[in-house]
Image (spheres, grey):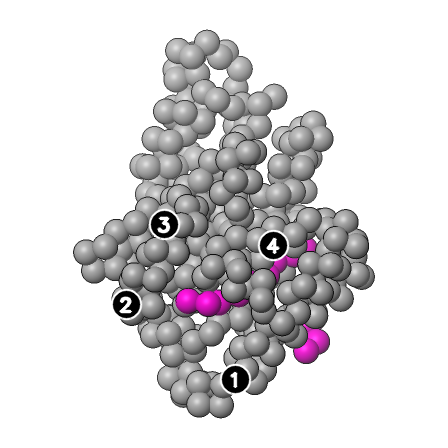
Amino acid sequence: MRIGLVVDSACDLPLEYLQRHEITVLPITVRIGEAVLADHRDEQATLHFLDTYIAQRGAEAETMPFTVQQIQDLFLQKLVIDYDYVFCMTITSSRSPIHDNAMQASFAILNDYRPVRAAAGHDTPFALRVVDTQNLFGAQGITAVEAVRLRAAGEGAPKIRARLENLALYTQGYLVPRDLYYLRNRARTKGDRSVSLLSAALGSALDIKPVLHCNRGETSPAAKIKGFDLAVQKLFEFTVKRVESGLMTPTVCLSYGGALAEMRSLPGYENLRLACSANNIELFESVMSLTGMVNVGKGALSVGFAAETAKFDA
């Protein structure tokens, strides 16, 4: 059985990895004023857009995910021919319409694929499963990497499906933003009142940075720490502890809202890298998606891994 994998561009994995494993990306388009860029996980294009537009006007950005029709067209023109079963893994449905769009498109795809496959010489059925990763950014990469491993090991679609849906329940995503004013203004633009003006003002005045935690689609502050560097160091130290105590998959994903050289110079990074190496954990590093950066701001750090328990202890 030919198994295909699809993610949206908010999934923070390196472009080289996505290409090498033939993972299809549903791009999310970002518009800031007259500037428009479709995010295809091109790190150089993302960094250029970041330096040119996001720092000044990112809070005003409009993000446009693939529509139901665009997803339907992608499947019927290509994926139903290239594969027999496709897993489409999306950003949490609580923060984006991509999951709902993919679900709506799936009904039409399963109704219309037969003549397309027949014309391509395939007389076997086609199936697809839309998986809500229930997480964001770096943490989205956990399910995608596990899907690649399972496919490479020759596992069948039913086992992969069960594993990915269970794994999503235990994927832990963490985020440290640099600028609470930006986060608050962006949230207000989107109608999200989760970051109040008072908390943003106090946080900026006192240099208090929240460590945000996402699991099962719910996002909440796990800690509040004075100073961005110290918050990042505490998050890296916490991740080292989780690595050493054992993860559900041998994967940690990092993404950063800027050049990776900046991330690698942050306090605690090197200890995390060494801990992953010593414990046979694959460490993925990528520039944060354009979608991620316009929503959480320049210089934010995202960390993802899978663990049954992940109470943050700063």
Q: How many residues crowd mark 1 within 10 Å: few (<14), some (14–19), many (20+)?
A: many
Residue labelled with disc 2: 57
Q: Are marks 1 and 2 in contact (CB under 8 Å)?
A: no
- Residue assigned mark 3: 45
* Mark 1 element type: strand
Do we see residue 111 in this rendering? Answer: no
In the image, what residue type sits under mark 1? Answer: Ile
Q: Position of residue 88 (x, y in %)?
A: 50, 39
Q: Is 289 placed above or below 108 here?
A: below
**Nearer-N-terminus badge (4/2):** 2
Could you tell which of marks 3 and 2 lies nearer the N-terminus? 3
How packed is label 4: few (under 14 Cα within 10 Å), some, or many (20 or more)?
Answer: many
Instruction: Specify whether residue 159 is painted magenta.
Output: no
The amino acid on which the numbered mark 4 sits, given as a three-letter code, is Cys
Quadrant in which the C terminus is drawn = bottom right
Which region is colored magenta?
298-314
